[in-house]
Amino acid sequence: MKKVGIVMGSKSDLPKLEKAIDILKRFEVPYEIHVFSAHRTPAEARDFSVNARKNGFGCIIAAAGMAAHLAGALAANTTIPVIGIPINASSLGGMDALLSTVQMPSGIPVATVGIDGASNAALLAIEILSLCEETLAKKLDDERKVNAEKVLNADSEVAMG
């Protein structure tokens, strides 16, 4: 199975990525975590993304706040999918990071989830890997059924009439 690369721009982003890590563990998806900055360690970030495919990665999750160029910098140097997580790290509530992550030039796509959206980033990464891993597709189907049951149970609890 291909690995998921999780790259954060700063170690301070790690708590916001715990939900993604938990989901990848629950789905038994191998992953690696790294701290690379698009601005402070551009050579290392570039090296990681240039070699991602040959190093067994199927996609990359990139989390960064403020200027948030990390996902785009990684995507510029690889053709495997990159999922950006804009992190709320400034007085702008993460909107700066969201716009920096989502506004990519034509030809260099970055899938972007919501601000601090680590859970959805992990699930999207698993969906991407599930295209070649039938066991992951089954686990995703099971997860959706469990989530639907939770909503229907909640409906039963609050339904009036």
Image: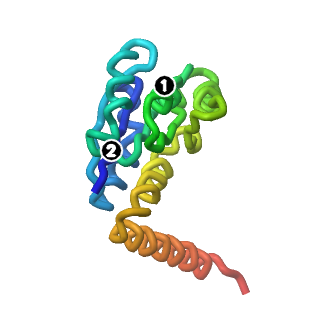
Position of 70 compared to 114: left or right?
left
Q: Earlier in the sequence, mark 1 or mark 2?
A: 2
State the separation of the CA atoms marked 1 and 2: 17 Å
Q: Residues within 10 Å of mark 1 (few under 14, many from 20)?
A: many
Amino acid bearing label 1:
Ala
Q: Secondary structure at mark 1?
A: helix
For mark 2, what is the residue?
57
Residue 73 location in percent, x, y? 48, 25
For mark 1, what is the residue?
73
Q: Residue furthest top?
A: 40
Q: Is residue 30 above or below residue 101?
A: below
Residue 108 location in percent, x, y? 57, 33
Question: Image quarter for residue 128?
Answer: bottom left
Residue 114 location in percent, x, y? 58, 43
Q: How many marks?
A: 2
Which residue corresponds to the image point at 47% horizontal and 40% vertical from the top-left? 82
Amino acid bearing label 2:
Phe
